[in-house]
Amino acid sequence: MHEWALAEAVVASVDRILQEHSGKRVLAVHVRVGELQRIELEVFRQGLAIHLEERPYGEEVFHLETDPASFRCNHCAREWLLEGVPGLGEDELEAIHFLPEAAHVYMRCPGCGSPDFALQSGRGVRIASVDLGGQE
């Protein structure tokens, strides 16, 4: 379950931030989960709960948001989202999940038909922000 490993990494990052700001407490952690990551958010939350045991902050401070997969054509500059691409089935989405560069095999720019495009967003799991408050 890579969701648990990702949750552990997020909690470790928040712990480091908290150590750097001694005496502060965690009010909110905003986490962006890339659509291409294809993680099960409920399993990720369970992983957070396990890794948050004995921490001075709990799962309630975590706010998860999906970061949609978006692309930009290098030829005509058109931008589009993965969810709007026709003909992508589970097999294709799984291939793109494991190797995002495989998108070039399954997609073309909806504007000009070029296979020359870049992934703009939607990969990985990242902490967008951590809100800290006064003393614990």
Image (cartoon, rainbow, N blue to C red):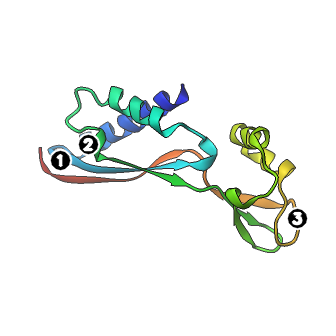
Along the line of sight, the residue nearer the viewer: 50 or 5: 50
Q: Residue at x 88, y 64 (%)?
A: 114
Q: Nearer the viewer, mark 3 or mark 2?
A: 3
Instruction: Give the residue type that dot 3 points to.
Output: Ser
Instruction: Give the residue type that dot 2 points to.
Output: Leu
Q: Nearer the viewer, mark 1 or mark 3?
A: 3
The residue at which mark 2 appears reads as 18
Quadrant housing residue 94 = top right
Q: How many marks?
A: 3
* Helix, strand or loop status at disc 3: loop
**Marks 3/2: CA–CA distance:** 46 Å
The residue at which mark 3 appears reads as 114
122 in relation to 4, above or below = below
- Taking the image as shown, residue 116 lies to the left or right of residue 3, namely right
**Marks 1/3: CA–CA distance:** 50 Å
**Which one is earlier in the sequence, the residue at label 3 or at label 2?**
2
